[in-house]
Each structure stands twice: as C-alpha cells, then as structure tokens.
Image (spheres, rainbow, N blue to C red):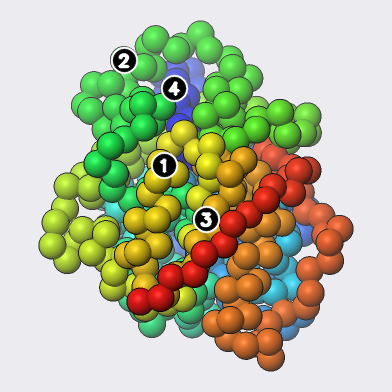
C-alpha cells in the first residue's frame, strides 16, 4: 500500500518465515545488488522490443506491487520496471540503516545506473514522489519524463488525517503503537489503510482485498518492517526541514524533464491544495486533478493515469516514439484495487 501501513511486529523469535511476495500474471522479479543495498525489481515484459524504459517508485509502506495495475496498461507503451525500496516489499534493509530521502534517491540512481537502460520515464507516488523529484533534480541525464502521483512534498499546514503518519517520525511512537495495536488483525489493518488511502474504498474488489490481506500478513512476519516504516517516515519529515538547494521545492524548480502531476480530490494524506503549488514549481508541467480519487490514483484509476501519461509522452517525444494504442478494455491484475468508475479528470498545463 502507500503511506499509512502500521503493522505491529511480534518478537523476532516467534516469527515464522515470511511467505513469498506475490507476482502478478505477466510479471517477473529479480534481485539487483547495488552499493549499500540489495533491491528487488519487478518487471513486466513490453509488448514489443525497443520501447522506452520506465521506472516506478512506491510510497511509504508500499511496494512495487502498487504499480502493477498501471504497468499492465502501459505494456504497449514503455518497458516497465518497479523497485522495492530498501526495507520494503521484498528488498532487505539497507546495509547502513539509512532511510533518508537522499539514501532512497541514491539507491534508485544506483539501480538505474546498474540497469544500463539509459534515461527512463520516472514515476513516483507519495514518498516515492519526493524520491523521484530528488533524482530528477540531481541526475537529469537519467530522467526522460517525470510523473508524480500525490508526491509527498513539504506542506506548511498538514491535514489532520495525515498526522498519525507523521507521528511515526517521533522516537518512541512506533513501539508504543505496536503495543497498542498488537491485537489488530490483518483484515482490520488493511481496511484502515484502504479507508485512508482510497477516495472510494468500496471499489476494491474482493480479490484485491484478499491479496492486500495476504501481503499485510507477509509483512507482519518481517522483523525489520516496522523499523523501516518509522525510519523512512523520519527521513521524509527531516527532508522537509532542509533549506537551500537541498529543499524539495527548490529541487522541483530544477527539474528539466517534462512533468505530469496527478492529485486526488479526496486525498487524506497530501493536501489537494498542494496541486497548484506543485504546478508552479515544476516548470512546463501538466496537472491532472481527479476529484473522486484519493492518495493512490495509479491504483484507484489506472486507466485515467495511463491516458494522462500517454498524452505527456506524445507531447514530449512525438507520435513516432509512442508505443501501441492501449485498448479501452485493457486489463491487468488490479492488485488491491480496480478502477470501475472512470473518474472525471481535469488537466491544466503550466509554462515555465
């Protein structure tokens, strides 16, 4: 999921071996060793050879699974790979225990360099949006276009519903929450996450909910997952305090790649009011607002996000470089959600 999964972790000695991570139909997993970390990369073979590479970065508490619906819809457009950040998904913790935004961005950069695929169409959601912004700012040679779904950029007035996630950054809060929620079932945790991250949780299919519960149960068996959550939350909050050239809004202004911004009107974690500010900071960006979507639009309404990306790609590269047309009935494993409503989207383009 994204930014709010709060699993309690029993003592390591009583934990059974975690189950294997789920792989959607048509996907593959591989392990990539880079300096300081071992990363799991999820890939989906493209519809044909020669399509441009794309790379996806998930949010806090999420994994590469968050991108499966969108990757399936874009298999005729890009050659997709999604990473599990260190300590999340199927990736073990980083060697040095550093979960800062800078460390996550460094891991992404090293993974991109190791792949030898050249510049990519880079996607990021929530925490992954902050990471992708930093990557695009400091390594423009690695980024063709940038697509950010509810990026976790600094806000002066944080939404009340986002406060519990922010509290994870406070030393001692994570162990306290672990004790207080020890009796919660995986189903209860998943329902809480869906209610917070989705604009309309009722659209999650029974199969998607079952998969989400299985993934939650798997993660609760990982002895380091809670620590990775707390340290990553702390790293995100710490990045908000940075000024000068290291500030995320200043780095947004340095991004040269054509940028697509996607914001949900029912997002309880990233303020919808931040959409216009982001559009002003990312030069020449286009803004898509989805009034009925929540924090994970690429999971709630992947068809809409895919369509917006195709428009970005067409304008940035020209029709000669675009892949096959995505059919209206294109289907992929929806993971924890299925888009059934086709929400209305509003698009604006800014010039900078």
Where the C terminus falls, by quadrant? bottom left
Q: Which of marks 1 and 4 is nearer the N terminus?
A: 4
Report which residue position mark 4 lands on: 9
Q: Earlier in the sequence, mark 1 or mark 3?
A: 3
Point out residue 349 in the picture as x, y percentages from the top left corner. 49, 69
Residue at horizontal 27%, vertical 66%?
251
Count of numbered badges drawn on the protein: 4
Nearer the observer, 151 or 102:
151
Element under label 2?
A: helix
Point out residue 44 in the picture as x, y percentages from the top left corner. 69, 64
Category of crowding for the residue at label 2, using alpha-carbon neighbours closer than 10 angstroms: few (below 14), some (14–19), many (at least 20): few
Residue at horizontal 74%, vertical 49%?
342
Q: Is residue 254 left or right of residue 183?
A: left
Q: Earlier in the sequence, mark 2 or mark 4?
A: 4
Report which residue position mark 1 lands on: 270
The Cα atoms of the two marked residues, 2 and 1, are separated by 25 Å
Q: Is residue 259 left or right of residue 28?
A: left
Any mark on residue 262, and which?
3
Q: In the picture shown, does residue 12 fall above or below 288?
A: above
């Amino acid at each position: 999921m994204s930014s709010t999964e709060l699993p309690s972790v029993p003592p390591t000695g009583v934990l059974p071996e975690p189950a294997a991570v789920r792989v959607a139909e048509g996907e593959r997993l591989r392990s990539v060793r880079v300096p300081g970390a071992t990363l799991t990369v999820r890939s989906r073979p493209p519809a044909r050879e020669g399509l441009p590479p794309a790379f996806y970065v998930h949010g806090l508490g999420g994994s590469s699974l968050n991108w499966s619906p969108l990757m399936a819809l874009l298999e005729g457009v890009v050659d997709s790979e999604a990473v599990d950040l260190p300590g999340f998904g199927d990736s073990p913790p980083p060697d040095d225990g550093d979960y800062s935004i800078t460390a996550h961005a460094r891991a992404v950069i090293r993974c991109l360099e190791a792949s030898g695929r050249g510049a990519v169409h880079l996607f990021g959601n929530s925490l992954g949006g902050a990471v992708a912004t930093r990557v695009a700012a400091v390594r423009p040679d690695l980024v063709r276009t940038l697509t950010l779904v509810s990026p976790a950029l600094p806000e002066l007035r944080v939404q009340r519903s986002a406060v519990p996630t922010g509290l994870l950054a406070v030393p001692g809060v994570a162990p306290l929450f672990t004790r207080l929620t020890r009796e919660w079932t995986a189903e209860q945790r998943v329902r809480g996450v869906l209610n917070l991250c989705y604009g309309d949780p009722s659209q999650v299919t029974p199969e998607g909910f079952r998969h989400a519960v299985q993934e939650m149960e798997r993660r609760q068996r990982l002895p380091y997952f809670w620590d990775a959550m707390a340290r990553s939350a702390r790293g995100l909050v710490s990045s908000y305090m940075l000024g000068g050239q290291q500030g995320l809004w200043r780095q947004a202004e340095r991004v040269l790649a054509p940028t697509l911004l996607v914001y949900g009107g029912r997002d309880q974690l990233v303020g919808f009011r931040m959409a216009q500010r982001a559009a002003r900071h990312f030069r020449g960006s286009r803004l898509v607002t989805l009034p009925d979507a929540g924090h994970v639009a690429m999971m709630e309404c992947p068809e809409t996000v895919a369509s917006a990306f195709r428009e970005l790609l067409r304008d940035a590269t020209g029709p000669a470089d675009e892949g096959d047309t995505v059919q209206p009935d294109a289907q992929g494993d929806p993971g924890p959600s299925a888009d059934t409503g086709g929400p209305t989207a509003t698009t604006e383009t800014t010039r900078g």
